[in-house]
Image (spheres, coloured by chain):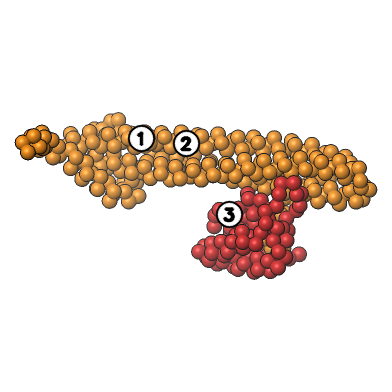
Chain colours: A red, B orange
Amino acid sequence: MIVRVSGEGQFRLPDGDSERLNELDNRAVNAVEQGDEHGFRELWTQMLELVAADGNAIDGDDLVESDVIMPPRDISFAEAKAEFTGDGLIPD
Amino acid sequence: MAGLAGRMSTVFKSKISRMLDKTEDPGETLDYGYQKQVELLQNVKKGIADVVTSKKRMQMQTSKLEQQVVKLDTQARQALSQGREDLARAALERKTVAQTEMQSLDTQVKELEAQQEQLIANEQKLRTKIETFRTKKEVIKAQYSAAEAQVKISEAANGVGEEMADLGLAIQRAEDKTENMRARAGAVEELEAAGALDDMTQLGSGQDDIDRELAQIGAGGQVDDELSKMKAELGPGDAEAPPQIGEGEQKGQA
């Protein structure tokens, strides 16, 4: 699985991480919907940590599309409200 | 996983497919794609240059605030030495506001600096990707049938397009941030200008709305502290005899 952290680049992660990342994402969406900034921050940090721990950075000479694009690390809660919404969550 | 991917990648994908939909012949698409990438790289460079310019402007604004802090401090001392505590207080209140804003700006400029470095590094990465695309397109043109080439092209082009769109987004964010900072710094300058302390008698007459506003911000504690510190510096300075001479004599006698 290829993940992009916006502003930082692409990382190759084991496919098994997809489920974990998705779970964190769902919980982050919930936190945002409930206006729980602290909860969101915690989950967002866990998502970034997962990418940092398991991901291998992809070189500039590798032209691949990302499966997942994560927002910028320093995303504000206001931005998160626009990004982490129920709309995009339901697959297809 | 469609959640995250769905949310952000649609923005990128539409940009990329707009780029690819222009032509039907794979060879032509490739050349067009590359040409477009090189063009967009120029925009990226310009965007980064704009961020750098904005940042420099912010640094200038920070040093202007720094001058104001010094000026207000001097005015406070002058006012106090003339027995005008009310004026000194007003000056110190403004100084506190300017100082707080200056510190916050300073922090943000430093953040922007880090972002700028990241942008430049990413631009380099994008340039490498475009170069890879250039090499790859010749290989694709030479080796693949039209149908196969189409698939390979969109893979490669999406890879470059995503990088480009992401960098564009990062530049946009950095620009928004400087805009935001500039507006805030401007507001403080205006505040200072509105309550300019040049005409001290006018201000001394009482509380104007700026004074009240400043007081509300809660600068009170810090101002009180500073005021008493200034008093201590100014006050006993005249009253006490120069102690250094005394010390010198003692040493001489010993």
Q: Nearer the viewer, mark 1 or mark 3?
A: 3
Query: In screen coordinates, is B224 left or right of A65?
Result: left
Mark 1 touches mark 3? (CB < 8 Å) = no
- Check residue B68 in the rendering and tell me which mark sits there, or answer none: 1
Q: Position of residue B111 (x, y in %)?
A: 51, 45
Instruction: Identify which amino acid the numbered label 2 is placed on.
Output: Gln
Query: In screen coordinates, is B9 left or right of B24?
Result: left
Q: Is residue B96 above or below residue B60?
A: below
- Check residue B59 in the rendering and tell me which mark sits there, or answer none: 2
Separation (CA) of disc 1 from disc 2: 14 Å
Residue drawn 70% across the image and 58% down it? A12
Query: In screen coordinates, is A64 left or right of B69?
Result: right
Chain at tag 2: B
The reply to whether residue A85 is visible in this rendering is no
Q: Of residues B8 and B115, which is closer to you in this image?
A: B115
Q: Are marks 3 and 2 on the same chain?
A: no
Instruction: Identify which amino acid the numbered label 3 is placed on.
Output: Arg
Residue drawn 79% across the image and 47% down it? B157
